[in-house]
Image (tube, rainbow, N blue to C red):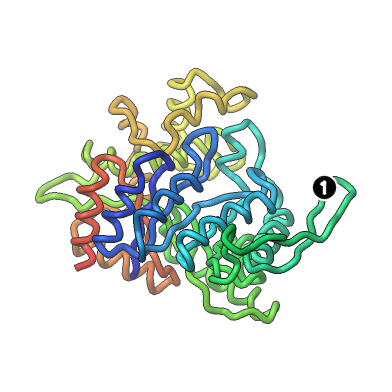
Amino acid sequence: MRTGIVVTARPGVEELAVLAEELGFSSFWVYDTPMVNGDPFISLGLCAKATSRIRLGIGVTSPALRSSPAAAAAVASLNAIASGRVICGIGTGNTARRTLGMLPTKMAELEAFTASMQDLTAGRETGYTEGDLTRTIKFLHVGPYVNVTDPVEFVVAAFGSKAAGIAGRRGAGVISFGVLAPEAWTAFDAARREAAREAGRPEEADSYVMTSLHVLGDGEDRYSDLARDKVGHIAMALLTFAADNPSFAESLEPAETDAMRRLLERRGTAAGDPGRHATLYRNYLGRIEPEDRDLIVPSLVDKLALVGARAELRERIAALQKAGIDEIVIQPVVDPEAEMRELAGLRA
């Protein structure tokens, strides 16, 4: 099982990318959430200049954030610096849109955007539409500006079979966030492969899951303050999504529903408040505040994160690999350097 690292975009992440490369990690990713973090392409440009081998991933961009020409230029420009090392994740903008108080884009737009990005970054023509007007576009100047020769790896963000099917039809891989149930990945893999066969695409493509990890110390409780600090950002992301999405909130367990209610109260908002995004997404995917540890209820730790002794973690990772995951991507938040070294030691 390969392992990678994901962080929030900001100046200085290139130092972590250098360490990740030294420790033998396969990939280094940054999130693309403009109203919460910095710009991923600036961060990855710094990483590209500071590293030589590790793959660099955008996790994930969206047609809700950029037009295909702008996004393709950014990806192909990064590919000119880190030739053949770029992974481009594409999604509906589930978080990035909600931080604006807006809904994610539709699946059809996701698929069309993915197709356009694949064409443009490979130097091919593609259709570009604004309103009722459609034109054929391509990069007019390549040379030293962008790299359309070395391939870019594309992955589609999926939480269900529809997005996995888009990945299959486009010959792309799958990436998901906090989904650690092996049966879910078995379903993703089956949907992707079936769609790939029907579209005449190769069935083989890589699958990635972004999560968090904590190796328990001797005698440490799996729900200790340190464990909650290390994995709480993933759990808080789910609670935030539930607070912002009533239909998803219905799937929560009672303790999770209570935690969501308390989160809304602490942020001084409500599920029906049109301005809730302004407070709900504060510090999104950052280290949780100590006063919020009680929101990280045990079921969230168990479902969304990898927490346990070394033997247990290796067993869970093996089960995920068997279900079709090729790479686990971990976000360190408490002490990134120490956590990266700990994760590297777990692989040994």
Structural crowding at the residue carrying mark 1, measured as other residues with C-alpha within 10 Å and reported as few (<14), some (14–19) or many (≥20)? few
The answer to which quarter of the image holds residue 51 is bottom left
> Considering only vertical position in the picture, is 103 above or below 213?
above
Q: How many marks?
A: 1
Viewer-nearest residue: 223 or 167: 167
- Residue furthest out toward the top: 268
Residue at x 73% of width, y 61% of height = 138
Q: Position of residue 283 (x, y in %)?
A: 42, 31
Quadrant holding the N terminus: bottom left
Quadrant holding the C terminus: bottom left
Viewer-nearest residue: 137 or 32: 137
Classify residue 80 as left or right of residue 247: left
What residue is pinned by disc 1? 130
Residue at x 56% of width, y 73% of height = 190
Note whether residue 303 is visible: no
> Considering only vertical position in the picture, is 219 above or below 277?
below
Q: Position of residue 19 (x, y in %)?
A: 26, 54
| Amino acid type, residue under disc 1 in the picture | Glu
Residue at x 66% of width, y 44% of height = 64
- Residue furthest out toward the front: 144
Note whether residue 324 is visible: yes
Q: Position of residue 26 (x, y in %)?
A: 35, 65
Q: Position of residue 342 (x, y in %)?
A: 20, 55
Residue at x 43% of width, y 21% of height = 266
Classify residue 105 as left or right of residue 129: left
> Considering only vertical position in the picture, is 114 above or below 9?
below
- Residue furthest out toward the left: 218
Secondary structure type for disc 1:
strand
